[in-house]
Image (cartoon, coloured by chain):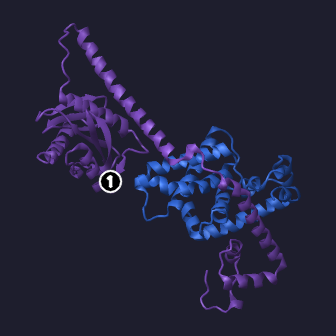
Amino acid sequence: MTGPNTPMSEYPIGEDELQAFIDERLDGERRAAVEAHLAARPDVAERIALERRQRAILRGRLDAKFAEPIPGRLRIANLRAVQRTSWVRSWTAAAASVIIFVAGATAGWFANEIAPAPLPVAPTASVAQGAHAAYRTFVVEVAHPVEVGVQQEAHLLQWLSKRLGRKLAAPDLSGFGYRLMGGRLLPGGNGAAAQLMYDDASGRRLTIYVRAADGTETAFRFQKEGEASTFAWIDQGFGFAVTATASREELLPIAEAVYRGFEGKS
Amino acid sequence: MADAEALLEPLIPALRRYAYALVRDHDAADDLVQDTLERALSRWTLRRRDGDLRAWLFTIQRNVYISSLRQDRRRGPHVELDESTTPSTSALQESGIEAQDILAALDQLPEEQKSLLLLVGVEDFSYDEAAKIMGVPAGTVMSRLSRGRQRLRALLETGRATLLRRVK
């Protein structure tokens, strides 16, 4: 809008210039040029004066609102507290669905009158359950599928590693068409669990779930619940699970790649 | 996220002012601001650290407001006024709008003119910043601003005798 080195009298005064004049955004020279322009055109001057007045009235009308103290419900600390509560609530719902599943399975035992001493849940089964519940909760999430996105991958992995007490790397699954979206921290077992989420070009999602678990080494355990398949295993005190909406045959090579990715990196 | 509180709270009064001008109801305005802040907090780590936080928040708030307008429209008939349906003077007077204030007149403008008059005229965003918030080219901002002010003037002039006296 600046006409460099133009003599004052030759400033082209267009509508943009007039609007900037109303908004008091012109420097002294351009302002003077607009004022001279308006002095020669009373009809335009009247309109501009009205629009300036209008702007001042609008600002004045809203002054009181701006001056109000911030109400408690908009305080950031309070909003944060509410956010945490709703997050815990959604997690509790996911955990409850696991309990219902386990209860149903136990009822099945008794119905068959086999009634063995209640078996301790195998650590791999417990890891698989945790992974499945977390998968079900967050894979359908559209707005916030991950807590920290892949844009901050280094920060994500550092943070999760610290909370897990184990160095965590994100396995490269691009060979299977999956790329990392990000991850989140979850409650798991007696401590923290980490979930890494991947998706493929069609939007299909896959999760890797890691948490501390008893045991040194186990075989892969396969489990399918609904559409979701999970391979879980324990390695050097940590449980791992890979979950996706995929068949056993599709998921096995991915689980093997993840296993190789984590092996010996404790 | 420890910095969120220190960075966000100073901007809340302006967000409340913009929200109130949009919805003209104190509680509904705070609902809008609350939605905006919740959204901002949930995306806090994704924001551009080199970007302008104030412009980012106003962009979110405007988007939240627009999507609530869309929801209202799905829920029931909602007459959006555009250039061709400016109410006649008599319609305005019959509805009692002239007895209200400049915010009522502003509310007669299409959302993009209303928001622009607020972002530029009240919140003092630069023309470039306003263009970014609204996702339009800078040239569009200037012509929209001019049209919006002209329309507001026309609306106020029709009810001028009563209106301007009351808004002092």
The spot of residue A125 in percent (x, y) is: 21, 28
In this figure, what is the number of numbered marks? 1
Amino acid type, residue under disc 1 in the picture: Val
**Residue depicted at x 87% and y 55%:** B162
Quarter of the view holding residue B128? bottom right
Helix, strand or loop status at disc 1: helix
Please name the residue that numbered disc 1 is placed on.
A150
The spot of residue A264 in percent (x, y) is: 11, 46
Inspect this view and state whether residue A45 appears.
Answer: yes
Identity of the residue furthest to the right in this view: B161
Horizontally, residue A240 falls left or right of residue A85, namely: left
Horizontally, residue B131 falls left or right of residue A167, namely: right
Horizontally, residue A121 falls left or right of residue A95, namely: left
Q: Which chain is blue?
A: B
A91 or A201: nearer the eye? A91
Relative height, residue B133 to residue A182 (above, below): below
Q: Which chain is purple?
A: A
